[in-house]
Structures are given as structure tokens and as C-alpha cells.
Amino acid sequence: MELASAHPALKAFMCGSLSGTCSTLLFQPLDLVKTRLQTLQNNAKPGAPKVGMFAVFVNVIRTENFFSLWKGVSPSFVRCIPGVGIYFSTFYSLKQHFFLERAPNAGEAVLLGAGARALAGVCMLPFTVIKTRFESGCYNYVSVPGALKSVYETEGIRALFSGLTATLLRDAPFSGIYVMFYSQAKRALPQEVTLSAYVPLVNFSCGLVAGVMASLVTQPADVVKTHIQVSPSHWSTADAIRYIYMEHGMGGFFRGAVPRSLRRTLMAAMAWTVYEQLMARMGLKS
């Protein structure tokens, strides 16, 4: 089947997958550092000085090697390439079905983004669990299939869907808030700016603003998700929240906020910019 004659939702899937590939490869080191910062809390002795993002970067390179910063990139690809594709194709389909004649308002944009992300998040959760464990450095998995088999055989199918609630509490609001700020920021700009030759830069800038806002709001859920998925025991969301608060106070819920905000903001901004440019080249309205 020729690409030109493909279904618009399939084109949106392909555009999303390509944008996800670019952004995942570039920003994987930030995700690894974020996971290490969050899991360091479990091993830190009382009163030990706090470890910063730069120190983790240096430690990974010194004790492992430079390319260890991309540890977990395989499950990230397995998760993000189809996951971002599912997200964008679902987003496109929902938008075409409900908002063909008009642009969604702020509240509708939140629901649109959250709905698309919830579906993609549930579909790709087993790979999210494996990715988090690869990045933590606490497990010696060799490959994604091997890791999936090991978790299934030793911990059961339930472990592959651990952190579902925390993941949805993180991803659905993130995407909802992101889409709201992104669409509203673009609508607020003069038409001559949004139709100029600087459209990719405008899209990227709007994405940066939206990403920062969405990252900060959803950071606590990301910390909870990491704790649940790295733990070999079956923690509930409530157990993880209680543990983080009792051991580290409110500040524990914002551990790893800087690398995560950088990664999620830059990754989302790039993904949306590439997606919109590819969709425009295919003659589709994103």
C-alpha cells in the first residue's frame, strides 16, 4: 500500500513514531539520570548529602562508561516508537471525530490529550516497567525479551503492570495539561506568526512552555511510579506514597524533577514539532 493512499490515522501513527524515535534517542540520558536520582533515595543513609543531577551523570560515566547513559534505550524504543504512534493516531482520530468543525477549548483539549495518552500508556505499560528497571541499575537484564520473560516467570504478570495507577496519574494529566497549554499558546499568537516560515520554532517554543507546566504538576506521580516499578515486591500506590513521605518528606516527591522536566519538555516539544511538520507535508491537519 502506498503511503499517499494510507488511512489518515495510519499516517498520524507513522508521523508520531518517527517523532518519538528522534526525541527518545536524544533525551534518553536525562531519563536514566532521573530514574537513578529517584532510586538513590532508597539506598541513601540518613543524613547523607543530597546527590545532584550532574554528580549522577559523572558517576555513571566514571563507574560504567559514556554509553551507559543510554542504558534502557532499547525498551525506550520498544515503548516509545509504537507508544507515541498510538498516542498521536488516537489524538488525531479523536480530534477528527469530535472537533472537525472547530478547535477544542481548554477543557476539551485536556480531555483530548489525557484520553489519547491513557490508551497509549495502558498498551505500553509492560515496556515502561522494563525500561524503568533497566535505567535503575538494580537489575542485570540483557535484553528486552529476556527481561519480560524474567519478570513474568519470577514475579508474575501482575509485575508487568505494576504502577498502572501512578503511570496514568502521571501521563494522562501531563498530556492533558500539555495539549491545553500548547494549543492555547498557539491560538494566542498572531496569525502572521503561526503561518510564517518560523512555524517549527513557534511550535517548539509553545511546546517548551507547555512541557514545563505539565512536568511540574505531574512530578510526584512519576516518583511514585518509579518506586513501585523498581521494587520487586508488590507495592500499591498508597504504599509507595506513604514510604516516600515517611522517609523523605514532601521533597522526596520532587526528586529527579530537573532531569525529568528537561527531558519531558524537550522530548514533547520536539515530538510535537516533528509530528506537525510531517503531517503538514502529508497534507493533513494535525
Image: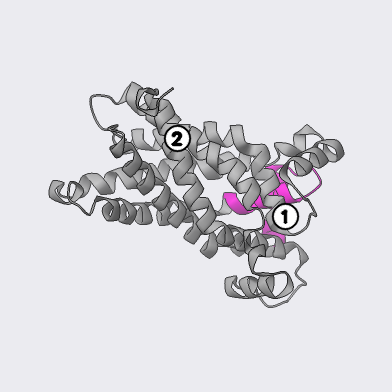
Is 227 magenta? The answer is: yes
**What color scheme is it?**
one colour
Report if the CB atoms under discs 1 and 2 are less than 8 Å apart. no
> What is the secondary structure assignment of the residue under circle 2?
helix
Q: Is residue 82 covered in magenta?
A: no
Kindly give the residue lying farthest to the front in the view shown. 2
The residue lying toward the viewer, choosing from 275 and 243, is 275
Q: Between label 1 and label 2, give the one nearer the viewer.
A: 2
Q: How many marks?
A: 2
Q: Quadrant of the N terminus?
A: top left
Task: Looking at the picture, tell me which residue is in the foreground, 263 or 144.
Answer: 144
Amino acid found under the numbered disc labelled 2: Met
Dot 2 surroundings within 10 Å: few (below 14), some, or many (20 or more)? many
Residue occupying the point 65% across, 46% down: 75
The residue carrying mark 1 is 243
Seen in the image, is 109 located left or right of residue 55?
A: left
Residue 36 lies left or right of residue 148; in this view the side is left
- Residue 117 place in picture, x, y as percent: 49, 36
Q: Quadrant location of residue 219?
A: bottom right
Left or right: 253 with respect to 186? right
What is the span of residues highlighted in magenta in the rendered image?
A: 221-247
Q: Is residue 241 visible?
A: no
The disc labelled 1 sits on which kind of residue? Tyr
Instruction: Give percent across and percent down for residue 134.
Output: 71, 53
Dot 1 falls on a residue whose secondary structure is helix
Instruction: Please tell me which residue is depicted at 64% across the width and 38% down the height of the picture.
Output: 125
Query: What residue does disc 2 label?
Result: 14
Give the spatial CA distance, label 1 vs label 2.
41 Å
202 relative to 110, above or below: below
Q: Residues within 10 Å of mark 1 (few under 14, many from 20)?
A: some
Query: Image point 59% across, 64% down: which residue?
Result: 251
